[in-house]
Amino acid sequence: MLLVAPIGVLGHVILHPPGHQLEHMNSPMWVPAHSLILISFLLILFGLAGLYARQSHRAGELGLVGFVLAVLSLTVSVTTMVFEVFVVPVLAANPSYQQLAMPEGPLLGGPLGALRFLGTTSFVVAFFLLGVATIRASVLPRSSGLSLIAVAALVLVLIVPVPGILIGVGLALTSVALLWPGWALFAGRAAGAPLAGALPNRFAADVAAAWNEGEDRRLQRPAPIIRSLPTRRSVIRPELATAAATVLLPLTGPDLCRLLVMERGLPPAKSEQRLGEHVIRALLP
């Protein structure tokens, strides 16, 4: 859902009238633009539930506080967008109630405006905490946590009065930043902990056993590679003759593959080439 939500945010930026005056509220683009961001907020709300569920076992209290704050702030955002979509056009179309729809009116300039400010401030704090918790949990790639912090920073800038064009740019950048954690969830790119830690107890033992079995096979894999080298130790640097398998061991692990291919974006073929070059430099004279 975090992958789809940015589409609605970008649509809102594109369709939104150039201001918040009466003529803009009566524009035929007002309702579609705010409907898109309303749907985006709902998608982000459900997407964050998946984000937290994925790493709740390692996110700790910091992640829990960030998640709860994010849910509360997004609930406020959904409420204010419902007002923008369903109430503002009705008020703006009736001269007797137009003042109620204005940003400086008794509603948006009063309790509803205060609620919106509180929700936005909570949003900033929530995404910052979630970003830090995501980095510390190391379940998703580090870039996911950094992108959540970037969302918090961008929304923080939008709290203060800025020109409309800057609001549009900020929202567009925010939508782009949301793609990273969305893609990490979609692609299942776990950065560290074995899968067993994220599963119910009845599955964890079987998955842990399968993981350990795979690790055992990986630990034994370098031995036949070393034995297959011509004249065995004669082609290996003398000081590494008895430790060649240990040198190869980390190069065959999933962590290095994840780092190069998933986090650094290196093509698999290029990754293999670089690992091969590293093995040659490490083992051969």
Image (cartoon, rainbow, N blue to C red):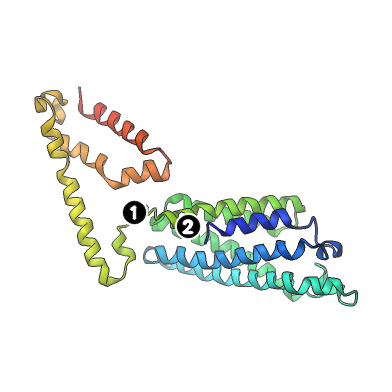
* The residue positioned farthest toward the top in the image shown: 285
Q: Give the structural element (helix, strand or loop) at label 1.
A: loop
Q: Left of 43 or right of it: where is 158?
A: right
- Residue at the right extreme of this rendering: 95
Please state the horizontal and vertical placement of residue 76, each as a whole percent of the image.
63, 72
Q: Can residue 248 be spotted in the picture?
A: yes
Q: Which residue has dot 2 on it?
A: 132
Q: CA distance from mark 2 to mark 1?
A: 16 Å
Three-letter amino acid code of the residue under disc 2: Val
Q: Is residue 86 left or right of residue 278?
A: right
- At a point 44% along the width and 54% down the height, the residue shown is 184
Q: Is residue 109 visible?
A: no
On residue 82, the disc is none
Count of residue discs:
2
> Mark 1 sits on what residue?
192
The x and y percentages for residue 132 are 47, 57
Q: In the drawing, does residue 66 fall left or right of residue 115?
A: left
Q: Quadrant of the C terminus?
A: top left
Q: Position of residue 209 (x, y in %)?
A: 20, 61
